[in-house]
Amino acid sequence: MGRLMVLAAIAGGGYMLYRKFINDAEAVTARGEQKRAEQKNGATGTLVKDPATGEYYVKKTDAP
Protein backbone atom coordinates (compact mmCIF):
# COMPACT_ATOMS: atom_id res chain seq x y z
CA MET A 1 0.00 0.00 0.00
CA GLY A 2 2.87 2.36 0.80
CA ARG A 3 4.45 1.82 -2.62
CA LEU A 4 1.16 2.67 -4.29
CA MET A 5 0.91 5.93 -2.38
CA VAL A 6 4.50 6.88 -3.27
CA LEU A 7 3.88 6.02 -6.91
CA ALA A 8 0.67 8.10 -6.88
CA ALA A 9 2.53 11.05 -5.32
CA ILE A 10 5.28 10.84 -7.95
CA ALA A 11 2.74 10.58 -10.77
CA GLY A 12 0.74 13.53 -9.40
CA GLY A 13 3.87 15.66 -9.04
CA GLY A 14 4.95 14.76 -12.56
CA TYR A 15 1.56 15.73 -13.94
CA MET A 16 1.66 19.07 -12.11
CA LEU A 17 5.13 19.81 -13.51
CA TYR A 18 3.95 18.86 -17.00
CA ARG A 19 0.96 21.23 -16.80
CA LYS A 20 3.18 24.06 -15.52
CA PHE A 21 5.58 23.49 -18.42
CA ILE A 22 2.72 23.57 -20.95
CA ASN A 23 1.23 26.75 -19.45
CA ASP A 24 4.62 28.48 -19.45
CA ALA A 25 5.26 27.41 -23.05
CA GLU A 26 1.88 28.80 -24.15
CA ALA A 27 2.59 32.11 -22.39
CA VAL A 28 6.00 32.42 -24.07
CA THR A 29 4.44 31.64 -27.45
CA ALA A 30 1.72 34.25 -26.94
CA ARG A 31 4.29 36.91 -25.98
CA GLY A 32 6.36 36.04 -29.04
CA GLU A 33 3.35 36.30 -31.33
CA GLN A 34 2.44 39.66 -29.78
CA LYS A 35 5.96 41.01 -30.31
CA ARG A 36 5.97 39.72 -33.90
CA ALA A 37 2.65 41.46 -34.59
CA GLU A 38 3.94 44.72 -33.08
CA GLN A 39 7.09 44.58 -35.22
CA LYS A 40 5.06 43.83 -38.34
CA ASN A 41 2.82 46.85 -37.73
CA GLY A 42 5.64 49.10 -36.56
CA ALA A 43 3.91 49.60 -33.21
CA THR A 44 5.79 50.38 -30.01
CA GLY A 45 3.20 48.90 -27.65
CA THR A 46 -0.33 47.66 -27.27
CA LEU A 47 -3.03 49.99 -26.01
CA VAL A 48 -5.53 48.66 -23.48
CA LYS A 49 -8.69 50.46 -22.38
CA ASP A 50 -9.20 50.80 -18.64
CA PRO A 51 -12.83 49.84 -18.00
CA ALA A 52 -13.13 52.03 -14.88
CA THR A 53 -11.87 55.31 -16.33
CA GLY A 54 -12.28 54.72 -20.06
CA GLU A 55 -8.71 55.87 -20.69
CA TYR A 56 -6.19 53.97 -22.79
CA TYR A 57 -2.73 53.00 -21.57
CA VAL A 58 0.19 50.99 -22.90
CA LYS A 59 -0.06 47.35 -21.84
CA LYS A 60 2.60 46.39 -19.33
CA THR A 61 4.41 43.08 -19.75
CA ASP A 62 5.14 40.89 -16.75
CA ALA A 63 8.60 39.97 -18.06
CA PRO A 64 11.51 42.42 -17.86
Image (cartoon, grey):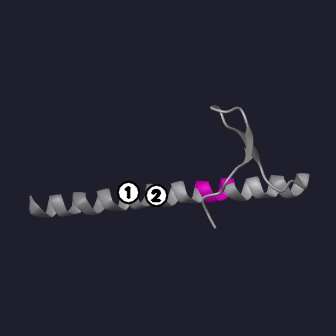
Q: Nearer the viewer, residue 17 or 55?
A: 55
Q: Residue at x 9, y 58 (%)?
A: 1
Relative image position of residue 59 (x, y in whole percent): 70, 50
Q: Which residue is drawn at 52% across and 54% down?
A: 23
The Cα atoms of the two marked residues, 2 and 1, are separated by: 6 Å
Relative image position of residue 43 (x, y in whole percent): 86, 53
Q: Does the magenta portion include 6?
A: no
Relative image position of residue 26 (x, y in whole percent): 60, 54
Please state, as top left, top right, bottom left or bottom right, where the C terminus lies in the image: bottom right
Image-quadrant location for residue 5: bottom left
- Are discs 2 and 1 less than 8 Å apart at CB? yes
* Residue located beneath label 2 in the image: 20
Name the kind of residue labelled 2 in the image: Lys
Secondary structure character of the magenta stretch overall? helix
Q: What's the magenta region?
A: 26-30
Q: Does the magenta portion include 27?
A: yes
Up the image or down, 31 lies above or below 47; here it is below
* Residue located beneath label 1 in the image: 16
Q: How many marks?
A: 2
Element marked by disc 2: helix
Image-quadrant location for residue 29: bottom right
Name the kind of residue labelled 1 in the image: Met
Q: Which of 10 and 33 is in front in this view?
A: 33
